[in-house]
Amino acid sequence: MAQTVRYPIGEQSFAKLRERDSLYVDKTHFIEKIIESGGKDYFLGRPRRFGKSLFLDTLKCFFEGKRHLFKGLYADSIDWNWEPHPVLKLDLNTEKYKTPEALDQAISYHLDMWEKTYGVAGDYDNLTIRFRNIIRSIYEKTGKGVVILVDEYDKPLVNNLHDRENFEYCRDQLAALYSNFKSSAEYIRLVFLTGVSRFAHLSVFSGLNNIQDISFDDQYADICGITEDELKKNFSEGIRNLATRYKKNEDEIIDRLRTFYDGYRFTDEEVYLYNPFSLLNAMENRKFEKYWIASGTPTLLMEEMKRFNVNLDSLLGAKCSRESLSGLDLDNPKPLALFFQTGYLTIKDYDFEENLYTLGLPNEEVKSGFLGYLLPYYLNTNGEDTPFLVSEFVREFREGDVEGFMCRLQSLFSSISYRMRMDQEINVHNGLLMLMLLLGLRVQTEFCTSAGRIDLFVATERFYYIIELKLDGTARHALDQIESKGYALPFAVSGRKIIKIGVNFSTKTRTIEDWIVD
């Protein structure tokens, strides 16, 4: 079947997208919300490749008065005079910012361009003062309020989370630059910033007058991302092509798309979103793959897990407040906020009474891709001669073949990457949890009972496994703890066979040394 739709993969220019007649899911009704709300300063946080840059460029074209680009879209029907405003778009998504000079050069590039475009004299060396002069001069020349758009305002900060000196330089430089939004407010029509994270102590937020953080606002829940209704309305041809490729009906393809790419939620309201980058790639390539995960490795999250000894199980199903998700503080970083803001965790439920969110992995792409990326740091899963077959491992667990799967685990823990410290029990727990989740087994670490916490609890249709782990101890000691604490008692009437396993892990040999089964 011939493909007639053009899918704008990675396209961040609204003008190019419209001029090339590429697929565009109409989000322009959000522009009406913005101009009618009476607000002046906005911030939107969303994960990478989620459509923030495209929406920002759509705003740019709108305020530049390019009405022809909006023909047939919602914005073309609103009450707006379409008179052009001067627009300054600061794109900070182009550099890695590993040196202070890199940030200064990126800012200087934009200032030079604006001075040249609007005929403003560059009489100042200080970047902050130059920016202030540009805003005032443009207003005086045009008589119109300046629209300022900042794409990925936090990129220099996120890229330097582990370089305190450079982080502080970037923070101070950006805070000074952004302070112009308040001091030059009389010359500004709109400020709109996008990014991944909202940094708690960056004065851009404390300094702005009544900034509207719409990241958690129900009214803007689907400002980026694709809803199910939008999927069915705009991607019908792609769905048909996938159905033909996989010899499935269209409902089955939608179910598969939902499992792989849907599941993102950013607000109290139950609005679930497809990852637009993955969806467009699946339609273009007519194939289900891990597109978003493959486009950027979660190295930063790996570093945070090692740095703060993060228990992965504590992140999955975690309950937390909005405040704990909306800010990042370098002095007291919370991995939960970082995992959420970068898109590896999302809102699964909201409890109105407790005002708490429950988090989890959004979909199969993130689950298999993220855990698959992390697993080699904890287990030896890269070697070609590793005696590990996923199907056999699952079969052994489900059939109660303890010796079989324990031997496989022993082999997997051998030759663990030097990058991972295995003298901490939490890292062994994380490795086991990732493996079980990837295999589709129901598993919990630190499972709480009235008598204590079970290290690892695995449930299959026929068995409950209670596994206690000791580092540089004995398997007998581990099994005795299961008995003395009565860990099996809550499951005694379940009707399933209970298998108790005491395991000793050696930090010297970096693998499972022995085990005892009851």
Image (cartoon, grey):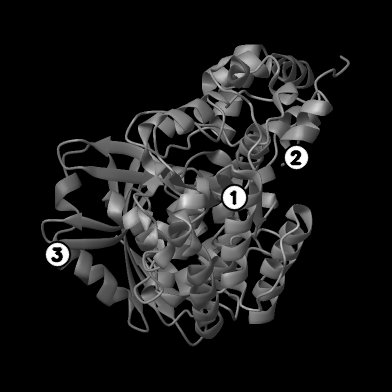
Please name the residue that numbered disc 2 is placed on. Answer: 11
Residue on which the image places disc 3: 485
Alpha carbon distance from label 3 to label 2: 58 Å
Labels 2 and 1: the sequence-earlier one: 2
Question: Residue 329 sits in which quadrant?
Answer: bottom left
**What is the residue that sits farthest to the right in this orientation?**
2
Q: With respect to residue 284, does 453 lie above or below?
A: below
Indicate the amino acid at tag 2.
Glu
389 relative position to 518: left or right: right
What distance separates the C-alpha of mark 2 from that of mark 1? 31 Å
Which SS class for mark 2?
Answer: loop
Which element type, helix, strand or loop, lies under badge 3? helix
Decide if residue 411 is in sight here. Answer: no
Viewer-proximal residue among 82 and 50: 82
Residue at horizontal 65 percent and vertical 35 percent from the top: 58
Number of marks: 3
N-terminal of the pair, mark 1 or mark 3, is: 1
Whole-percent x, y for residue 488 in the image: 19, 53
Res. 364 in view = yes
- Name the mark on residue 139: 1
Q: Kindly give the residue lying farthest to the bottom in the view shown.
A: 508
For image coordinates 29% across by 44% down, the residue present is 357
Q: Residue at x 62, y 69 (%)?
A: 130
For the C terminus, the quadrant is: bottom left
Where is residue 432? Give x, y as percent.
Answer: 45, 61
